[in-house]
Amino acid sequence: MSAIYEKILADLKDAMRNKDTQRLQVLRSLKSKILEREISERKGGDVTLSDEQVQQVLMKSAKQRKESISQYKDAGRTDLAQTEEYELGIIEAYLPEMLSEDEIRDIVKNVIDKIGASSKSDMGKVMGTLMPRVKGKADGSVVNRIVRELLD
């Protein structure tokens, strides 16, 4: 069993004991999504997810929360946006530290120099080399935007 998943289960029990209903709801949702992913990965055999796979589930949940926050703010629903922000904070507690834009920019510059990329036509090469290095530590859309900026 994944260490991240074990931590979520332990925190879920603590939330039950402390009657922290909001936190409990978020942790139950995460547990459910992780179990869904585990079932979809099975294909006949018994499979437990690795930390990386659990991280992917959490990152997907975090991304959904971020999108919801921006939509709620655009619609003027600050109450719902605050709820989503709280849930996002809980989810992010289980994710590794994300790279800052400056750190991503430095890594992108190194990869561009290493490959010798000079135009947008080299973007596929850059992304192919770059994504394994930043996987799980940076949002793909941010990486993509920075690569586009630097290749212009």
Image (tube, helix red, strand yellow):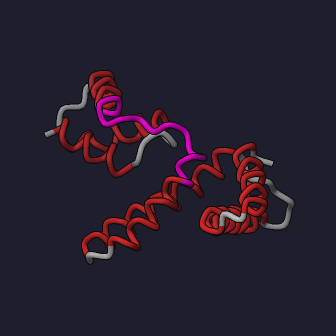
- As rendered, which of 30 and 56 lies closer to the eye? 30
Position of residue 62 in the picture relative to residue 42 (left or right): left
Confirm whether the magenta stretch covers residue 98: yes
- As rendered, which of 144 and 90 lies closer to the eye? 90
Is any atom of residue 33 visible in this view?
no
Position of residue 121 in the picture relative to residue 107 (left or right): left
- As rendered, which of 81 and 128 lies closer to the eye? 81
Where is residue 58 drawn, in percent x and y? 57, 55
Q: 8 above or below 27?
A: above
Confirm whether the magenta stretch covers residue 7: no
Question: Which residue lies most toward the front here?
Answer: 18
- As rendered, which of 57 and 82 lies closer to the eye? 82
Q: Measuring 56% from the left and 54% from the top, which residue is drawn there?
A: 90
Q: 128 above or below 17?
A: above
Q: Measuring 36% from the left and 41% from the top, which residue is drawn there?
A: 127
Where is residue 152 drawn, in percent x and y? 13, 40
Residue 117, quarter of picture:
top left
Q: Which residues are magenta?
A: 90-104
Question: Which residue lies most toward the left here?
Answer: 152
Position of residue 7 in the picture relative to residue 100 (left or right): right
Q: 109 above or below 137?
A: above
Where is residue 132 drawn, in percent x and y? 49, 37
Q: How many marks?
A: 0
Residue 21, quarter of picture:
bottom right
Where is residue 95 drawn, in percent x and y? 56, 45
